[in-house]
Image (cartoon, helix red, strand yellow):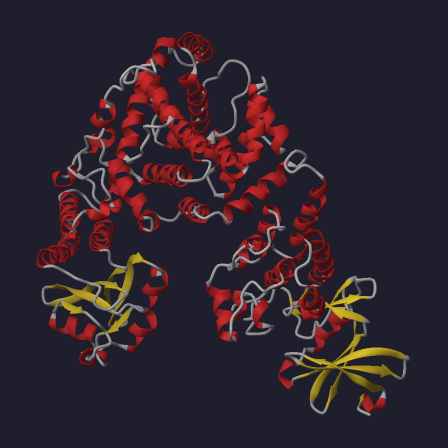
Amino acid sequence: MKEFAGGRFKVVKELGQGAQGLVFLANDTQLERLVAIKVLHSHSVTTADEAKIVSRLQHPNIVALYDTLVHNGHPCLVFEYVKGQTLAQLIGRDGAMGSVAAVEMICGVLEGLAYAHEQGLIHRDIKPHNVMLDEQNRPRLMDFGIAAKRGSKEAGGMIGTAGYMAPEMMQNLPVDAEADVFAVGMTLYQMLTGRTAAEGESVFTILHRIANEPFVPPSSLKDSVDEKLDHLVMVALFKNPQERYHDAQSMLLALREWLGGQNQQEGVESSGNSTLDFLLRRMRHTADFPALSQAVTAINKINEGDAERLQVLSEVILQDFSLTNKLLRIVNSVSYGHFGGTISTISRAIVILGFDTIRNLAITLLLFEHMHNKSQAVALRDAVLSAFFGGILSRELGKKSGARDVEEGLICGMFTALGKLLTVYYFHEENVEINKRVQAGGNEESVSVQVLGLGFRDLGIGVAQSWNFPERITASMRSLPEGSIRSPQNQTERLRLFANLGAGLVPLVYMPKAAAEHALIEMEKKIRPVYAWTARDLGDLLKDSASAYLGYLSILGVDTRDSDFANKLRQLTGVLTENPNAPLVADTIDHAQIMTRQFDIKSEISLLDESLIPPAETLAAGVQDITNALVTSFKLNDVLQMILETMYRGMGFEHVLIATRDPKKNKIVGRFGFGAEIGEIIPLFQIDLDKAVDVFQVAMERNADIFIEDINIESIRSRIPSWYRTVLASQTFIIFPLVLEKRTIGLLYADKGKSGSLKIAGKELNLLKTLRNQALLAIRQKQMGL
C-alpha cells in the first residue's frame, strides 16, 4: 500500500489525475479521517507563505487545506475529503442547467472565492473540475494548490487550464482577482449552455480564441438565458481585466441582484444605481456602442499639453472614416466660413477652430451617427433628431447672449436628452410604458423615475460621468431650479441655462401655433430678469435654428424625408405646408445650406461617399491646406501632423510616421504618426546610421526615395532589417528621406499590410514628394527662426 509522510497517510485509492498531478484518497492514521492528497509536479511548488494562507481558508464553500508535505521530491497537498461529485461530472451527465439553478450554484462558488480574495489570495485555476458538490449539493471550491497572493505585480505566467485561463495570463502580465472572475465566468457560461465559451481542436486554438476572438452570448446557444443574465456573464469575460468585475464580491452582488429580480417585474422596482449599472453593461455588448464609448472616453481623457492634444485627438478622429469626413464637411460649411480658406485635414481644423470646438463637434457627431442607425428606428431617429436640435438651439441661444465659447453649448444642449435617448434604445419596453403614462397625463421625468428607478436626466448624467465628461458639461445636464432664472455667474452656469432653454424650446416644434405662441410668452416671462428677449425673438430664433439645422443634416447626408420631426421643422420654416394633401414643396433650404467653402474639385460630390474621391484630389487639397498654414505663424509639429494626416487619409495607408535624427544615438528614431498600434510602433522604429546595409540605411545614405512592393521577394528579403519584421507586419512600404543641406535629418514612412496592395500613380507620387518638400520647408523656416 502506498504511504505518505512516513506512513501517516495510507492511500485507499487513486481519485484522479489533473494538470498539476495525481490525487489520492488516503486515511490519516493520526487523526483518523479520510483526506485527499494531491501530488504536484515538482515545478508547481507552492511557497510556504502561500501554503500558510491557504491553510487558514476556513469557509463552507472552500475545501480546506490541512497540510503540505514532500514525497520523493514532489510537493504534496493534503486536503479535506469531500464526498460527492465534481461540477464537471454533473455537467457531463446532465448538460446545461437552468438559469436560476446555475446562478444559485455559482453564487456559492463566488462566496468562497470572495472570502479567499478578502484574505489576499487568488485561486488561478477555477474550473468545473475544481468545484466539488457535496452530499447536500453545496459547491465547494477546491485545489488552491497554485494559488498566489493578490496585488502581486509579477507576471502570472501560463498557469491554469486552457479553456478557463484569462487573456492576461497568456500575455504573461500581472494576474489578480479579475483572472479568477474570468474563470468563474467561463464556468458559469458552461453551466448555462453545456459547452465552453472557447472550443477548439487543440490547446493553441482554444488559447487563441480566448485571447483574440469575441465570445457569443449564452443566449445565442440557450433561449432560456435572459438578456440581463447574458450581460452579467459577458461582463466577466471581457478581454481587458479592467473592464471585468473587480473581484468575486462584485460579481456575486450582481448575480444576487439578478436572482432577486426573478420574482419581480423587471425595471419597476429597481434602484437607480442598478438601472445605471445595467445600462452601462448592456451598452458594452451592443454592436456599435463599445466603439462609441471608447472614442468618447478617449476624447474626454485628453488633457496633456497643446502638441500632445492635437496628436491624440487627431488619432482618435481618424480611426473613424465616416466621422472624419463628416467633421470636415461641417468645419467647411457656411457656419464656419468666417475662418477663411479650406480645411481638408483634421489637424488643421483643430489648429484653426480650437481643440474644444472640434472635440465637442466630434462627440456630438459620434453620438448622432451611432444612435441614429439602431433598431426601433422610427422612434429612435426622431428622438436623436430632436436631441440634436436641442443642441443647436442651445448654441444659438449662447450666441444671442453674446457669450464666448458657445460651441460647447451644442453638446450640452444635446446631452440634456441623453438619458431619454438611451432609454428609447436600451429599455424599449420600459420606454413604451413611460410613453403610456405620459400620454395619460403624467410628468415625463416623474414617470421615468417610477418605471426605471431614476429620471432621464440622472440616467444621462451617470453615463456622461462614466465617459469622463468634465463637470461643467454634466452640471449643464441638470434641470434648472423652479422659479425665475437668475443671471449666470460663470461658464458652467451659462451652459446649464442655455442647455435647459434649448431643451425647453424643442417641444414647441410639435405644438399647434396658438399653443406654441403661449409657451413662448411664458418663456419670455421666465427669462426676463436676465435677458430682454421677447416671445417674438425666441420664435424667430427657433425658426432660424430649424432652417440652419435642416441644412446641417443635409451636409451630413442624413435622409430626413420620412421623419415626422424633420417635417415639423419644415412646416415651422414654411418649406412644407401643414395640408397633408398639398404637393410637397421642394426642400430648397436643405440644398441651399449645402454651399460650403470646400475646394471646388469636391463640390460636385460633397454628399457622396468620400471613399469615391481619387487619392490625388485629397492629397492636392492637403497640399493647399498646408501651404495656407506655412504662410502664417505656425507650430512645426502642427504642420508635420497635417502632412502625415494628408498622406494617411489620401492614400489609405495603414501606418504613416515621421522619424528624425537622434544625435546622441546616431540613429533615426520614430516621433509620431497615425495607424493601428502606432503608440507601440514608434518607440521601436529605430534606424542605425553607422552603416548602409538594409533598405532604410540605403535610403538615408543615398537620399533615395524607396518603394518596396513586397518585403519577401528574393532580391529584397535580406535587406529588410530584423527589427522591422518584429515591429511591423506590413509587407509593402515607401520611404521619403528628409535631407537638408546634404544632411539627413529624418524620413517619412508609410505602409500597407498586404504585398502588392500599395499602388501609387505618377500624380500621387509627385504630390507625396510635395508633402515631403513641405515638411522640409517647415523645418527650415523654424531653423531660421521664421
Outermost residue toward the front? 581
Q: Which quarter of the picture shows residue 581?
A: top left
- Residue 414 pos. (x, y %): 42, 30
In the image: residue 76, left or right of residue 477: right
Residue 207 drawn at (x, y percent): 51, 70
Query: Residue 456 or 342: which is nearer the viewer?
Result: 456
Eyeballing the image, is 184 above or below 10? above
- Answer left or right for 305 relative to 178: left
Q: How many marks?
A: 0
**Is residue 394 visible in this depiction of the protein?**
no
Q: Nearer the viewer, residue 119 or 424?
A: 424
Q: Is residue 413 above or below residue 236?
A: above
Q: Is residue 426 visible?
A: yes
Left or right position of 297 against 365: right
Query: Looking at the image, which residue is at 43% across and 10% down?
Result: 524
Using the rendered view, name the quadrant where residue 555 is placed. Answer: top left
Quadrant the N terminus occupies: bottom right
Q: Give the x, y percent position of residue 634.
A: 20, 45
Q: Position of residue 286 (x, y in %)?
A: 48, 47
Above or below, 36 against 408 in this view is below
Residue depicted at 46% across the width and 64% down the height = 212
